[in-house]
Amino acid sequence: MAGPLSGYKIIELAGIGPGPFAGMMLSDMGAEVLRVDRADAVRDGASPPLWDVAARGRRSVGVDLKHPQGPEVVLRLVEQADALIEGFRPGVTERLGIGPDKCLRRQPKLIYGRMTGWGQTGPYASAAGRDINYIALSGTLSMIGRIGEPPVPPLNLVGDFGGGGLLLAFGIVCGIIEVSRSGKGQVIDAAMVDGAALLAGMMHGLRASGQWGERGTNLLDTGAWFYEVYETADGGYISLGPIDPQSCGEMLRITGLADDVDRGGQVPDQSDRDSWPSMKRRMAALIKTKTRDEWCAMLEGTDACFAPVLGPDEAPQHPQLRQRGTFTELAGVVQPAPAPRFSRTVAEISGPPPRPGQHTDEALADWAFSGEEIAGLRAAKAIG
């Protein structure tokens, strides 16, 4: 059964990080995503990047965008496309001759998705940057970490992927829905700094109401003793998150923490922030009396809001994730499976990451290039 985006055609100008992640999301949902790689990468004989999970599920053509005929190849592809993904600095595709104005003239219904860190406008727009910089400027990084310690970068999940690639994929799907009504394409300016700020919307609301303070002292940022990661006797870790009274009561009952607290076993009210540091010390001492597996045996499957902290090699083997198929294996690489799930259509990976230019001839033929045109472009070294 076809995926929910089956029938839509998307061009992805090869890049790194969030652009390919958006392409993966759309490909997993059934869209035909054609990746335009550099022709010199084809000529260098690069191997299929099987480790590059975000590149899975599409074909690759090699095009020299600096060759006089290279941009025309992309514009010809654009004529049949529903959307395009590019992740260059502002102005680069315009200089290459494949900017949004030229593309929209070829395909007025095109959704032209632009992925940058700082956005297409503003004093930082043309500056280099990385995930850590985007989430720092957005104010989001300052809220992640423990009290008295520097902010902790959450890998590159908040900027590159959540605030970047996922935001762009969402924008492209929104654009495709809108063009079905208006008949007019448009340009999407997806910026990681915007996405990182958006992901922290709840925290900004809590700050406005006076419920969010210094880093590491709040309900969800390791300030609370009942929303924390604790080390076990064998050096493992467990996570606890019973923020509601019912779940907290279940956790207290099963762990026996109430019996370990002075003054007749009374546990301070969860809202008593003054008690959080001392309660955290008590909880840490208690959790360290048993191994991770022992706590799993006691707490898994209960309403105590518990889960072991699993390593990346362990997670795919957990019964919950195995039953759901949360992870899959492709070309020998264990990786997350497409998500979310649909009741009627199927989200699936259509193939492993391609070698640059692996499908140049067959893909161009499928996109209405004649054999003579393909041969001529190759002879001119416009394609690889």
Image (tube, grey):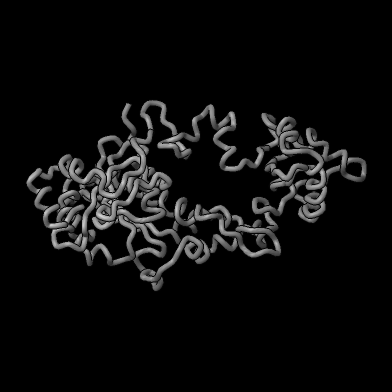
Which is nearer the eye, 320 or 354?
354
Q: Quadrant of residue 238?
A: top right
Residue shown at 58% from the left, 55% from the top: 203
Q: Quadrant of residue 368?
A: top left
Q: Is residue 380 left or right of residue 240?
A: left
Relative image position of residue 29 (x, y in whole percent)? 36, 37
State whether residue 169 is above or below residue 87.
above
Residue that sits furthest to the bottom in the current view = 123
Q: Is residue 238 left or right of residue 118?
A: right
Q: Can residue 362 be seen here? A: yes
Relative image position of residue 186 (x, y in whole percent)? 26, 54
Residue shown at 50% from the left, 34% from the top: 326
Which is nearer the eye, 62 or 366?
62
Relative image position of residue 204 (x, y in whole percent)? 56, 58
Relative image position of residue 66 (x, y in whole percent)? 20, 63
Residue shown at 25% from the left, 48% from the top: 357
Which is nearer the eye, 11 or 112?
11
Q: Can residue 34 be seen here? A: no
The quadrant of the image that shows the N terminus is top left
Q: Is residue 256 left or right of residue 4?
A: right
